[in-house]
Amino acid sequence: MELFDSIRRRRLTQQGHSSGKKRRTYADRALILRLDGSSGVRYGLYLLFTLFAASLAFNDSGATGQEEGVGTLFSFLVACGISLALFEILCRKVSGRNSHVFLVLLGFAFQLLL
């Protein structure tokens, strides 16, 4: 959104209709900033990633029986939970913002699909 605003300001400045200064708009950014720092959204992203990765592991495991599939799913959920906990603890700078978490988990999901 800010990219389009900067392009619009630059065009208006070139035409002589604007000084080029950015207007301060806090009302629309308050919700975005609140969602970007929300723990609930972050843990929801973790849950979605875990379910996605578990479904990939379950489908690619080749387990034929009921017990083998449940064992595979349980062990993968434990491994995924531990890795996400380590990510949360060790990467505080990245895990502080949900937009960064989303990009990291999207990269992990893409790597898992390959």
Image (spheres, grey):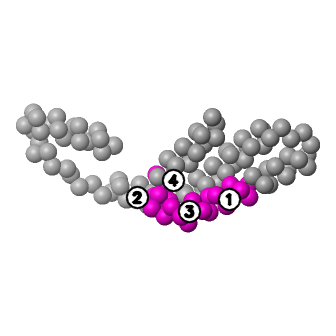
| Distance between mark 2 and mark 1 Cα atoms | 27 Å
Q: What residue type is labelled 2?
A: Leu
Kindly identify which numbered label has been placed on residue 88: 3
| Distance between mark 1 and mark 4 Cα atoms | 15 Å
Kindly identify which numbered label has been placed on residue 33: 2
| Distance between mark 2 and mark 4 Cα atoms | 14 Å
Please say whether residue 38 is visible from this viewpoint. Answer: no
Quick one: quadrant of the N terminus?
top left
Q: Residue at x 51, y 53 (%)?
A: 101
Q: Mark 1 points at which residue?
A: 81
| Distance between mark 2 and mark 3 Cα atoms | 19 Å
Q: Magenta residues, as a range?
A: 77-99
Q: Name the residue under label 4.
A: 101
First along the sequence among labels 2 and 3: 2
Question: For the residue labelled by badge 4, is the local secondary structure a helix, a strand or a loop?
Answer: helix
Disc 3 to disc 1: CB gap under 8 Å: no
